[in-house]
Image (cartoon, grey):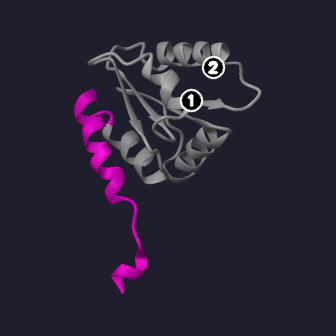
Amino acid sequence: MIGIIVVTHAQLAGEFINAAELIIGPAEKLLAVSIDRSSALEAAQEQLSHSVQIVGEDGDGVLILTDMFGGTPTNISAELLSPGKVEIVTGVNLPLLLKAISGRRSQALEALAAMLKDYGRSAVMRPMEML
């Protein structure tokens, strides 16, 4: 099973996981890493590296979901990119996280990341357009 780490500014990562687990119940191999003003960059990098080891221990790969491209969470995650082992998808939202959790047992890492990139865009709706 692909491990998932949500990496965001402030406590958003943990709250995304709390919301997801409220909807689908407890999830395995799912961790949050939060980066805030008091976080030393080196400590955040160490926490992320350790999290990758924990959720990636079975060798199916690790998917890192970050809040925004170009931000510190994505930049420190990018140092861990490894084809077939670690992928990153930016712009995490709750539907995207739920889809990642539900799809990680049936897809390879690269395919899951590509599908989530497209799915994340389609999960943003403007209800007024539906009227």
Mark 2, secondary structure of its residue:
helix
Q: Amino acid at mark 1?
A: Thr
Q: Kindly identify which residue carries mark 1.
A: 72
Q: Amino acid at mark 2?
A: Ala
* Residue at figure coordinates x 62%, y 43% from the top left: 12
Magenta-colored segment: predominant secondary structure:
helix
The picture places residue 100, in percent across and down from the top left corner, at 37, 41
* Residue at figure coordinates x 36%, y 51% from the top left: 120
| On-image quarter of the C terminus | bottom left
Residue 108 visible (yes or no): no
Residue 29 higher or lower than 92, as above or below = above
The picture places residue 130, in percent across and down from the top left corner, at 34, 81
Residue 16 higher or lower than 83, as above or below = below
Magenta residues? 104-131
| Disc nearer the start of the sequence (1/2) | 2
Q: How many residues crowd mark 2 within 10 Å: few (<14), some (14–19), many (20+)?
A: many
Q: Quick check: is 124 in the magenta stretch?
A: yes
Instruction: State the image quarter where residue 81 is shown.
Output: top left
Residue in the foreground of this view, choosing between 20 and 16: 16
Residue in the foreground of this view, choosing between 102 and 118: 118
Q: Quick check: is 52 in the magenta stretch?
A: no
Label pair 1/2, CB-CB below 8 angstroms: yes
Outermost residue to the right:
38
Q: Kindly identify which residue carries mark 2.
A: 44
Mark 1, secondary structure of its residue:
helix
